[in-house]
Amino acid sequence: METKLSNYFFCSFIVLAALVFSFNANASLPEFSDLVKENGPSVVNISTTQKKVHNRFMPKGWNIPNMPEGHPFEDFFNRFFDGQGGEREYKSKSLGSGFIISEDGYILTNNHVVDGADEILVRLSDRREYEAKIIGGDEKSDVAVLKIEENNLPAVVIGKSSDLEVGEWVLAIGSPFGFEWSATQGIVSAKGRSLPRDNYVPFIQTDVAINPGNSGGPLFNLDGEVVGINAQIYTRSGGYSGLSFSIPIELAMDVVDQIRNNGKVSRGWLGVLIQEVTYELSESFGMEKPYGAAVLQVVKDSPADKAGIQIGDVIIKYNDVTVERSGALPPMVGRTKVGTEVDVVIIRQGEKKTLEVRIEELEGGESEEDVAKKRSGVEKTIGLSLRNMTAEEKKKRKEGDYGVVVAEVGKGAGSNAGIKAGDIIKMINNKTVYSIKEAVEMLSDIDKGDVVPVLIERRGTPMFLAIKAE
């Protein structure tokens, strides 16, 4: 009897504990309904129209002239091609989202939502519709500013993405697949994500369900403040896969201010090529742990060069902010006001040094990496980025001062042959290589399908590789 009573009380205790745990778990979940009610009216639906021309029945690039009067095929072409050689005009439409940032009708969205649009229609939550004009857009940050002619509009409250913590709840409102004012929630998965071809945006990664049509919509924190613009998803199917990326609101508002005040966006320029610091590299640099950005190349007469930054330095702090990964540095530099003097902390041969750098303006339309490569004499061929050896590199080599260095390896014949970044190309098809110009000419002269020997040096060891021209 005692055993049965003990089992009974034990089971009751377990059930009670489960109920208490369940209650506490449910009690800790956030409530989003008020947030959606308060902020939904500030979110807008954006539809764009772009006029395009194509030849409906003809292969791309073909065009049939108007038939002369009385031509045997005049009636045929007039009937099927409107007498215009098959050219037909059509309208391409797309959907996106945005949000009101001021009561007088300024709206923030993604640049890719409105880029190239001939007509932009903004629809409010109360079903009012307005034609919008583009005040300005910035391709690098993917931010665009629109304006509609209306006043007393419900504007969002701008927050700080820098205050976000990984694991914090966030909410998105937008128009996925055209389903207007849809709300989805999730948590911040990571901060400061660097994505390919987006060097100037330290993205906020979330697991909020974002789909086509959400682009340009706001990301809210639980205080109802906008902390980001929903911009991209990682997907292999075209739909949501659990990885969504948002532009930090501070970066976006900086772009807005520059567009409204100056009509363009200016970015800071340092003048270096950099790479990630691996565990092995950190040991070779005399570092306690892997972090920072290793300097591969310094552009002559650039801000970095003038400040004394050298190849082999590791930039670990920029303007009092720690550089955790190499991808974090370009956004820091890009947001720095031109002419500002900043402290850059480096590690050189195991010792820390602080250098003062005066930031200059980045050339328009290019990235820090593009400008650095162009001014450093880096050229691309067969998927390889090549540069000449520095004087310091020449001194260290026992095999003479000839050859070119492989700075980067992309897709192409070079990668297929097994060439890696850091290799020194010494000979191509039994001819000695003394400069980038010679290397590019030799590789360009290889006929498609031909295979030629290439002598490289890797970590001091020479070896032949076979390159097949594609």
Image: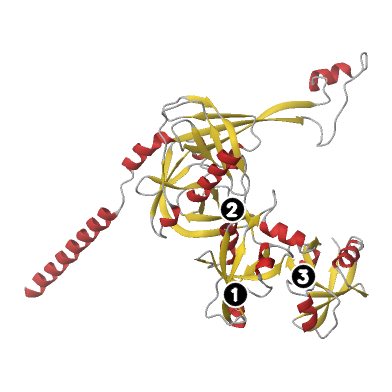
How many numbered circles are shown? Answer: 3
Please name the amino acid that badge 3 sits on: Val
Mark 1 crowdedness (10 Å alpha carbons): few <14, some 14-19, many ≥20: some
Q: Position of residue 63 (x, y in %)?
A: 85, 30
Q: Is residue 463 left or right of residue 50?
A: right
**Residue ID for mark 3:** 406
Residue at disc 3, secondary structure = strand
Please name the amino acid that badge 2 sits on: Arg
Q: Is residue 159 visible?
A: yes
Q: Which of marks 1 and 3 precedes in the sequence?
A: 1
Q: Position of residue 95 (x, y in %)?
A: 56, 35
Please name the amino acid that badge 1 sits on: Thr
Mark 2 crowdedness (10 Å alpha carbons): few <14, some 14-19, many ≥20: few
Task: Find the distance from the CA under tag 3 to the CA under tag 1.
Answer: 19 Å
Examine the image and state in which quarter residue 333 appears.
bottom right
Q: Which mark is residue 236?
A: 2
Asked if residue 134 is positioned above or below residue 408 in the image, the reply reads above
**Residue ID for mark 1:** 278
Task: Find the distance from the CA under tag 2 to the CA under tag 1.
Answer: 29 Å
Q: Nearer the viewer, residue 25 or 132?
A: 132
Where, quadrant-wise, is the C terminus in this rendering? Answer: bottom right
Q: Which mark is residue 80?
A: none
Q: Which of marks 1 and 2 precedes in the sequence?
A: 2
